[in-house]
Image (cartoon, rainbow, N blue to C red):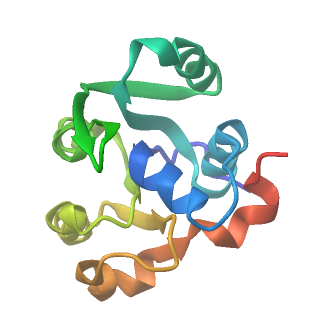
Amino acid sequence: MRNKNIVNYAFIDSQNLNLGIRSQGWKLDFAKFRVLLEEKYSVKKAFLFIGFIKENQDLYNLLTKSGYKLIFKPTVEYKESGYKQTKGNVDTELVLQTMIELSSFNKAIIVSGDGDFYCLIKYLLKKRKLRVVLVPNKKYSSLLREFGSFIVNIGLFKNKLKRR
């Protein structure tokens, strides 16, 4: 039974989440993931940090309808090995939004295995504001190892979260 007075927020690195799950051979059902965040971790707000691509408006509408608050980052296009790539690095936005919201939540759920969030996770732990770090890969940054007791692999919930 959940405590209704607990207000936890999730801060989600969408690129790390999406690529991490796909690298394991399955696709995430984002609507089911939002329900899991609410039911298991009492997440009232789930901030999803994502690069903005105009052609993906239907996806953004679906994510918003599923209960995510989208934080957009402009994207940059570049060529790699002759192929057009799009990058929307959201790390700074995720850290900044977490700090802006710090007094509004009891605990934070960080969704990423990226070592760039080491200082944020360490700070949240120091302030007793860290609930869990959900990592989408079996392999995540070695910088996060010291937070091992807070790390949960999303793959544990694959049967509940896999897109059918």
Toward the right, the furthest residue is 164
For image coordinates 18% across by 35% down, the residue present is: 100
Toward the front, the furthest residue is 82
Please state which of residues 108 and 110 is positioned toward the viewer in this rendering. Answer: 110
Figure check: 99 above or below 147 = above
For image coordinates 47% across by 43% down, the residue present is: 7
Please state which of residues 153 and 147 is positioned toward the viewer in this rendering. Answer: 153
Tell me the quarter of the image containing the N terminus.
Answer: bottom right
Hey, which quadrant is residue 67 in on the image?
top right
Q: In the figure, is residue 121 to the left or right of 70?
A: left
How many marks do you count on the picture? 0
Q: Residue 25 appears at what percent x and percent y? A: 67, 63
Figure check: 65 above or below 46 = above
Q: Residue 110 appears at what percent x and percent y? A: 39, 57
Figure check: 27 above or below 120 = above
For image coordinates 43% across by 85% down, the residue present is: 149
Q: Residue 73 appears at what percent x and percent y? A: 26, 27
Q: Residue 14 appears at what percent x and percent y? A: 43, 44
Please state which of residues 130 and 156 is positioned toward the viewer in this rendering. Answer: 156
Figure check: 127 above or below 70 = below
Q: In the figure, is residue 122 to the left or right of 140?
A: left
Q: Looking at the image, can residue 11 be seen?
A: no
Q: Looking at the image, can residue 139 be seen?
A: yes
Q: In the figure, is residue 145 to the left or right of 57?
A: left
For image coordinates 45% across by 76% down, the residue present is: 151
